Amino acid sequence: MALVQDKPGVLNRVASMFRRRGFNISSLAVGHSETQGLSRMTFVVEGDEYTVEQVTKQLYKLIDVVKVSDISKEDVVLRELALIKVRTTPSTRPEVLQLVEIFRSNVVDVSPDSVIIEVTGDEDKVDSLLRILKPFGVREVMRTGRVGLMRGMVKSLAMDDPGRASKPG
Amino acid sequence: MKMSGAQIVCESLLREGVELVFGIPGGTILPLYQTMVDYPQIRHILVRHEQGAAMAADGYARATGRVGVCMATSGPGATNLVTGIANAQMDSVPLVAITGQVSRAGIGKDAFQETDVTGITLPITKHNYLVMKAEDLASVMKEAFYIASTGRPGPVLIDIPRDVFTEVAEFEYPETADLPGYKPVLEGHPSQIKKAAKLINEAQKPLILAGHGVIISWAYAELMELAEKAQIPVITTLLGRSSFPNDHVLFVGMPGMHGVAYASLALDEADLIIGLGMRFDDRITGKISAFASRAKVIHVDIDPAEIDKNVRTHVPIVGDVARVLRQLNRLVESAPHPEWLDRIEELKREHPSLHIRETDRLLPQAVIRDLCEATQGKAVIVTGVGQHQMWAAQHYSFRDKEANTFITSGGLGSMGYEVPAAMGAQLGRPDKVVWAVCGDGGFQMTMSELATIVENDIPVKFAIFNNNYLGMVRQWQELFYNKTYFATHRTRNPDFVKLAEAFGMPGLRVTEPGQSMSAIREAMAHPGPVLIDFLVEEEENLYPMIPSGQTTAELMEYPVAKEVRP
Ligand SMILES: Cc1ncc(C[n+]2csc(CCOP(=O)(O)OP(=O)(O)O)c2C)c(N)n1
Ligand SMILES: [Mg+2]
């Protein structure tokens, strides 16, 4: 997870660094943070400890990046939102709606031959719902990618921490 | 005070102490140029190609330690800067590049001479800016110079639309740059310093590997103190060649692909490597898994991203080399290491990598030695890329105690660097003799700058190592492609002496060893720029050589080195 300055092109800088250094990101989500002028990015990077360390350091090298945390080993809440459009017929609709219920998801749009389901949860939950809906005919899926926050009280902006030697020149 | 964007740029340059800029004007940057007329304190050098502007600014920066500044117009002007910017990025050189951009309304419309320069230079700059409001210019200029020159230095590009130059805004130059995401760490962490000192005090065979960072942080005296106090032999990277006087008893040499064998072997035998301001580049390490296999590693660098990137470190220290060494020197104990120093001397005797054969032919290595003798090892040597570069690195004995006297394109390896960089270095250091050590290939990439050099009477001395080949590539063809000399032989090189004369400077030609020294002295006696065309042995090979990605076991020595005595 990274806190970045909310400047034009910052997403491009981050994405370009990932591409250039050959790091694989499987998802990336960006949005405003609690502090004006700062955005929070959550990305999921595939790789071993060495890769995670390199990603962190290379992110820090970007001038607009203020703070990077590897939250994979922390006590975190991770969530993803997905919109799923599923084909329905009068005979399958009740079954689909029942599944929506079980997964504590919502139907946000109904058409004569399909519904759009909104589901929020960890990645596994979204994956399982998708698997279960597959036989009905999943027409379109839009997933946000994971976003996360650490539980409990953490300093929201640990940017003045003098002990950190990670912010490079 | 209200000012135009162009005035704000000029005022900011003044406040940053800029005295010299290199560039070529054009449509979008013209408002800035026309404003510079009112700022005669800022000298503008009109180069012949924008690559020359970037590389001259780079040479100036390396020779002086100050920020080099170059300018270009949008589109082709800006794209011509690109190789020079990439070069500065690879070698951590403080550079500010100012480019004109099409007016704001034209951006994104493929307007005439529009190029996405911030996009193009994103991965080859430390940071870059597209300034969309004149009121942002002052803070951007402040930040740009701050970012370029602090931490691990690097190039910063500022792209300015034409109508931002003419827009009027309030000018107030900020005292500091407000960059919450940028805080270079200078002081080494005390507990890491302690650990490092302990390793040094315990080591039997310590070895210092000094890099460009020693020069950038001006840590000459601190490096000397550490080496002498604990009697630690010093090897250097290519860019660190002039970080330690080469006539000092503790100086060993440069290891790696074209380093001297005894320096590479010392790395193999050492029990502690102290890497200072360097990045364990593949030209130094060869096969990573076999690199310095008996040694623990202390790595001091200001860029945390270099720590553990290529070589796993036992004690990493993030910080400015000079400051870290000052901290370290307090804790390091005096130690003699007589056996280790004897062993190094033995390695030097067993592997006389720098011996050259007796011949009546003009050997490039011998010319470098003549250059060294004539300048007492104190000239600023600026090289191109190829065999001549490595011969200069091997055979010139750098003796200036506190100056960057070896200026070369290390990380990017960009042919043609020598001509503009030597020009910039000479402008930055008028007190020094500057020799451009040129390849006949690379020289032809940027020789148009001879016009700039003559026009401004910049007294650079040019030595062309004319082997009629793209020599370094020819050598690979000889060794690895069965002498298939495809696309490396120059059958019709220009007459470099006449060329020099055409540009308006004297040219000399040297064909035999006996003429070399007198020609060099003649060139140095002449007050202005001079060119010497050295017709050197064409198929001379560069040794030692450790083929790419291999180990000292595969090291190839100069074939005659074993037989010939000095
Ligand atoms: C701009 C650029 N193009 C190509 C190369 C690849 N290259 C490396 S060394 C070399 C030969 C250089 O020839 P020359 O300048 O005559 O020097 P020599 O090796 O003969 O001393 C070439 C082509 C390069 N380093 N830079
Ligand atoms: Mg050549």
Image: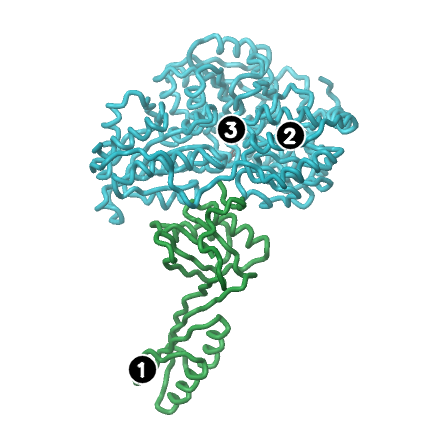
For label 1, the crowd category at 10 Å Cα-Cα, with few meaning under 14, some 14 to 19 and many 20 or more, is: few
**Residue in front for this viewpoint, B192 or A1:** B192
Tell me the number on the disc at residue B330: 2
The answer, for residue A13, to whether it is visible in the render is yes
Tags 3 and 2 in contact by the CB under 8 Å rule? Answer: no
Q: Residue at x 47, y 45 (%)?
A: A61
Cα–Cα gap, marks 3 and 1: 68 Å
When asked about the image quadrant of residue B311, the answer is top right
| Disc 3 and disc 1 on one polypeptide chain | no
| Disc 2 and disc 1 on one polypeptide chain | no
Say what amino acid the circle numbered 3 marks.
Answer: Thr
- What is the letter of the cyan chain? B
Q: Is residue B195 above or below residue B49?
A: below
Helix, strand or loop under label 3: loop
Q: Which residue is mark 1?
A: A110
Q: Residue at x 37, y 55 (%)?
A: A35
Q: Residue at x 39, y 70 (%)?
A: A142
Q: Position of residue B411 (x, y in %)?
A: 52, 36
Q: Position of residue B372 (x, y in %)?
A: 58, 16
Q: Is residue A122 above or below residue B299?
A: below
Mark 3 or 1: in front is 1
Q: Which residue is mark 3?
A: B408
Helix, strand or loop under label 1: strand
Chain designation of label 1:
A
Specify whether B331 is left or right of B41. Answer: right
Cα–Cα gap, marks 3 and 2: 34 Å
For label 3, the crowd category at 10 Å Cα-Cα, with few meaning under 14, some 14 to 19 and many 20 or more, is: many
Say what amino acid the circle numbered 1 marks.
Answer: Val
When asked about the image quadrant of residue B251, the answer is top right
Tags 3 and 1 in contact by the CB under 8 Å rule? Answer: no
